[in-house]
Image (tube, rainbow, N blue to C red):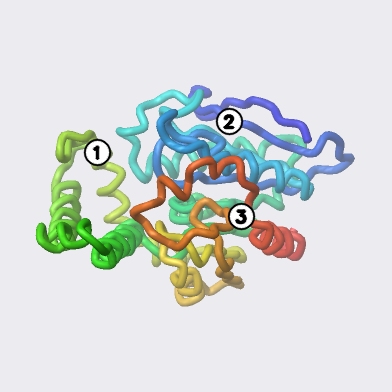
């Protein structure tokens, strides 16, 4: 595998990595990886304080071994890409992904008629919009599917409330005494109202800077209509232990699409595409994700993705 540093965008303001098999006598199929939410670099890693996920570099290595040219990149304001991440909205991310797609397709080593998009988490919401009018060969959704950001947040809040209600001992008594579960619900509703009503790109909420433009544009976007407009085959895969996107929603993709759509739930896989032994508990994600970047991606996931790609190249 060969990997080279690249820059793209109108002013070369975005940076990434292009991976491809060392030698090939013909142009190869290609895959663009779209990252999940948050200030993630091309490898899926965020700030130094957060866990090192090493998610997209592992995906790229696997897909390149399967014979694909793969492009992954640092989001605005992360890694070596310029810009201000916290001011970046949903449609800004679409623009950046389009620029990445055009750059990938223009590479001499790439077969322009065999380009796929793989979206992870938020990338699943971006992919249908990025694919519009581009003649994409297929879309792959991992850890996300027929679910808007607002719906995903509702799912996460429900899990938080459920975890609080199941807490035992003195801690559980304090939670019930202080009405913590009701406060969680009210805070969520207050947050949604505040970001929806403001016209500013960035606001402060409880002393923390929030990318309000991103939230607002997500809330206004109809992800279900976007799915209905997809014109290429879709593979949607998620894990049974995903607590950041609702697993069962993966099968809902078929309700909104008119194209060939295949869906899977990988038993025991979490949102970071790794097999998880621990129980699903959203309150203990930090513990579950500790050192997760050192673990391999789910073998079952990779098998499903490779099988689908082999049939659609």
Q: Assess disc 2: are there few (<14), some (14-19) or many (≥20) residues with their C-alpha within 10 Å of its C-alpha.
A: many
Reading the chain from its start, which is encountered first: label 1 or label 2? 2
- Quarter of the image for residue 213 reads top left
- Residue 293 seen: yes
Tag shown at residue 16? 2
- Residue 101 seen: no
Which residue is denoted by mark 1 in the rendering?
A: 210
Labels 3, 2: front one: 2
Q: Residue at x 46, y 53 (%)?
A: 121
Give left or right: position of 11 versus 192. right
Closer to us: 292 or 297: 292
Task: Give the alpha-carbon distance from disc 3 to disc 1, as whole Å.
Answer: 35 Å
Q: Residue 25 appears at what percent x and percent y? A: 89, 40
The answer to whether the residue labelled 1 contacts the one labelled 2, judged by CB atoms less than 8 Å apart, is no
Task: Give the alpha-carbon distance from disc 1 to disc 2, as whole Å.
Answer: 26 Å
Look at the numbered disc 1 and give the secondary structure of its residue: strand
Give left or right: position of 225 versus 260. left
Labels 1, 2: front one: 1
Q: Residue 130 appears at what percent x and percent y? A: 50, 50
Which residue is denoted by mark 3 in the rendering?
A: 135
Residue 123 higher or lower than 159, as above or below: above
* Quarter of the image that includes the C terminus: bottom right
The answer to whether the residue labelled 3 contacts the one labelled 1, judged by CB atoms less than 8 Å apart, is no
Residue 267 higher or lower than 13, as above or below: below
Look at the numbered disc 3 and give the secondary structure of its residue: loop
The answer to whether the residue labelled 3 contacts the one labelled 2, judged by CB atoms less than 8 Å apart, is no
């Amino acid at each position: 595998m060969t990997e080279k540093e690249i820059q793209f965008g109108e002013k070369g303001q975005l940076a990434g990595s292009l991976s491809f098999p060392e030698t090939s006598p013909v142009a190869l199929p290609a895959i663009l990886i779209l990252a999940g939410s948050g200030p993630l670099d091309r490898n899926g890693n965020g700030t130094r304080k957060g866990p090192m996920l090493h998610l997209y570099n592992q995906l790229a290595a696997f897909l390149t071994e399967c014979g694909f040219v793969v492009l992954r990149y640092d989001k605005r304001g992360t890694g070596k890409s310029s810009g201000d991440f916290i001011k970046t909205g949903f449609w800004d991310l679409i623009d950046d992904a389009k620029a990445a797609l055009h750059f990938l397709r223009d590479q001499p080593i790439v077969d322009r008629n065999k380009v796929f998009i793989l979206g992870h988490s938020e990338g699943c919401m971006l992919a249908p919009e990025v694919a519009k009018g581009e003649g994409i060969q297929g879309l792959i959704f991992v850890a996300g599917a027929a679910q808007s950001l607002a719906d995903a947040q509702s799912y996460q809040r429900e899990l938080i409330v459920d975890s609080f209600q199941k807490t035992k001992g003195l801690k559980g008594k304090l939670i019930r005494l202080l009405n913590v579960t009701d406060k969680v619900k009210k805070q969520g509703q207050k947050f949604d109202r505040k970001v929806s009503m403001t016209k500013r790109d960035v606001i402060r909420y409880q002393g923390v800077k929030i990318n309000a433009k991103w939230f607002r544009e997500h809330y206004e976007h109809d992800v279900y209509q976007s799915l209905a407009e997809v014109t290429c085959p879709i593979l949607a895969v998620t894990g049974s232990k995903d607590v950041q996107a609702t697993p069962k929603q993966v099968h809902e993709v078929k309700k909104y699409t008119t194209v060939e759509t295949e869906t899977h739930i990988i038993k025991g896989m979490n949102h970071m595409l790794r097999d998880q032994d621990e129980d699903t508990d959203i309150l203990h994600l930090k513990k579950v994700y500790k050192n997760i970047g050192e673990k391999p991606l789910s073998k079952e996931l990779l098998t499903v993705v490779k099988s689908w790609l082999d049939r659609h190249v």
